[in-house]
Amino acid sequence: MVRKLVVVVSLYASALTAAHAADLTVTVSGIRNASGSVSAGIFNSESSFARPSEAFASFRIKATQASVGFTVHDLPPGRYAVTAYHDENGNGRLDFDPTGVPTEGYGVSNDARNPLAPPEFAKAAFEVRDQNKSVTVNIGY
């Protein structure tokens, strides 16, 4: 009996999570050429923000001039932010000059780029609830 109850509760909790999940569609625009790839990360906390190894989800897509997009299905409700960069030389990372300024194009959700400092989660964050959501990240060079 207890085993059946645990299974029923687990199934009910899964159904509730799926019922409240939404799709997040991300468009990365402003890509200046088709060289290399576009990498993007979705972050769900300030502590993990802009740390690629701590992304909630990450994507690498062949670059196309103008824009690329992807959709994450069944994203749980919460607060998220997206970063993306155009890895033109295909080395798998965002490159910087000796002073720490990015030498490849990058962008942040809500256009929360700061040319003098790293982007902030609070400015880049948006809410995902039980409705599908679309965000655009504009790449700047």
Image (tube, rainbow, N blue to C red):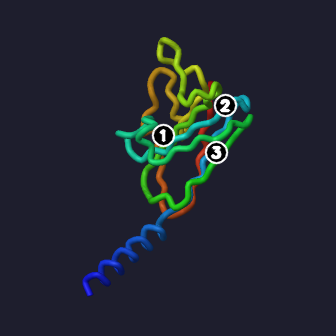
- The disc labelled 1 sits on which kind of residue? Ala
Most foreground residue, 105 or 8 = 8
> Where 100 sits versus 82, above or below?
above
Q: Mark 3 points at which residue?
A: 27
Q: Mark 2 points at which residue?
A: 36
Q: Is residue 91 left or right of residue 128?
A: right
Foreground label between 1 and 3: 3
Viewport quadrant of the C terminus: top right
Distance in Å between CA atoms under marks 1 and 2 = 25 Å
Secondary structure under badge 1?
helix
Place of residue 41 in the rendered image (x, y in percent of width and height, measured from the top left): 51, 41
How many marks are shown on the rendered structure? 3
Query: How would you rate the neighbour count of disc 1 (Cα within 10 Å): few for under 14, some for 14-19, many for 20 or more?
Result: many
Query: How would you rate the neighbour count of disc 2 (Cα within 10 Å): few for under 14, some for 14-19, many for 20 or more?
Result: some
Q: Residue at x 70, y 29 (%)?
A: 35
Give the mark nearer the N terminus: 3 vs 2: 3
Give the mark nearer the N terminus: 1 vs 3: 3
Foreground label between 1 and 2: 2
Viewport quadrant of the N terminus: bottom left
Q: Is residue 68 left or right of residue 94?
A: right
